[in-house]
Amino acid sequence: MAGTSQVVLRPKTTDEVSAILKYCNERKIAVVPQGGNTGLVGGSVPVFDEVVISTQLMNNIISLDDLSGVLVCQAGCVLATLEDHVSAYNLTMPYDLGAKGSCHIGGNIATNAGGLRLLRYGSLHGSVLGLEVVLANGEVLDCLSTLRKDNTGYDLKHLFIGSEGTLGVVTGVSILCPQKPNSVNVAFLGCDSFSRVLDTFKQSKQQLAEILSAFELIDAASMLTVKENLNLSSPIEDYPFYVLIETSGSDGNHDKEKLDRFLEHLMETGIVENGTVATEPTKIQNIWGLRERLAEALMHDGYNYKYDVSLPLSKFYGLVEAMRERAGAATIRVIGYGHVGDGNLHLNLTTSEYRQDVMDLIEPYIYDWVSGCHGSISAEHGLGFKKKDFIYHSKSKSAVSLMKKMKHLMDPNGILNPYKMLPSD
Ligand code: MLT
Ligand code: ZN
């Protein structure tokens, strides 16, 4: 997606953002807040000639309390930079994304980004302790609390987490960083069927319990994508499904013992066919690369139809099979990967260039399918511009109606990220 904006503003301070919004609101000039521009649903891209407010220069780290683990920073800090900063204090960021090298924390909050370790640390609704937000009229809303517990009135920060810049522009963040684990192990396993993947998940919750930090799926077609398009290689032979399990904890011997016992059980019972374990950082990195670089690998095909849905685990892979049957012949590939541990499937199809006939095979079929299982049509990427008109597949009329009332109350001139998230009706 590419807009036709004439103006990009790069404020450095909250006061500058406030002055910009006051000016734009008085003149009814539409704006698009933009972080690292790594979104996947067109949420940070202008549709017409909206003014882009980039957080690129708002990249100051304000404070880090290494006892409580509370980090306070500006919205334009890049996630990987924050991770490097807190690492030096033996802390880690409570979320991790493939786009960490360029995404901004403000954008992560605006989209309520989930990522690879949500299974362990929960969503940003739990980790974010406070926000500073500039409202449509330029007023600065100071909710930049650093307290873990604060039951005084409505917890307004939650309104802005996942609101995709439609209610205010996040300028400051206070976030709780957990202790950095001393020991990290990754197991990469091959399974014969998706039901074996689910058996593995069940066992991992029981046996790895508190040290389980990620449970990710790659299907055979995904593995082929990174092999063909990025020249990566698998550490194990070919299987219909691969599972990436990460453990992290404070005692290497304890964690390794637990992981070995768990893997022994999986092999003995035939739940898993084959696998490898990585303890050294380079090997761990290489295995994570197979999963994290899938989005990049897909781009090499030409056009990528991307879907990010939440489904009950019993239906999780059924959608990939249904879509493959429906659109497989018309596409280069139909692949399924994602955060099984969170019930979040990434279903992707590719063609060499955009084709309306392929799109007609996918939508609204996919949304009807998800809605039929009481899933969500957007698990973690948001609705942005691309998916906003399908909101009713996941939200009731009364919920959308209240969202619209809130939007009108907080942004009566409709200047904040118009044409995004809420349906056009
Ligand atoms: C991921 O989990 O890799 C990201 O959400 C991006 C994607 O869906 O490809
Ligand atoms: Zn994801």
Image: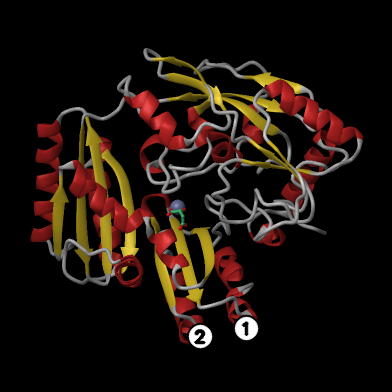
Q: Residue furthest bottom?
A: 329
Under circle 1, the secondary element is helix
Depicted 37 relative to depicted 386: above or below? above
| Residue displayed at 44% across by 69% down | 300
- First in sequence: mark 2 or mark 1? 2
* Quadrant position of the N terminus in the picture: bottom right
Amino acid type, callout 1? Asp
| Residue displayed at 56% across by 77% down | 353
* Res. 220 mark: none
- Which of these two is toward me, 262 or 382? 382
Q: Mark 1 Cα within 10 Å, few/some/many (few <14, many 20+)?
A: few
Mark 1 CB within 8 Å of ligand 1: no
Residue 341 picture location, percent across and down: 36, 50
Residue 227 picture location, percent across and down: 29, 69
Q: Mark 2 Cα within 10 Å, few/some/many (few <14, many 20+)?
A: some
- Tell me, yes or no, whether the two marked residues, 2 and 1, touch with CB atoms within 8 Å: yes
For residue 134, what is the image quadrant?
Answer: top right
Q: Which residue is mark 1?
A: 357
* Quadrant position of the C terminus in the picture: bottom right
| Residue displayed at 22% across by 66% down | 191
**Any part of residue 20 in sight:** yes
* Res. 330 mark: 2
Residue 267 picture location, percent across and down: 11, 59
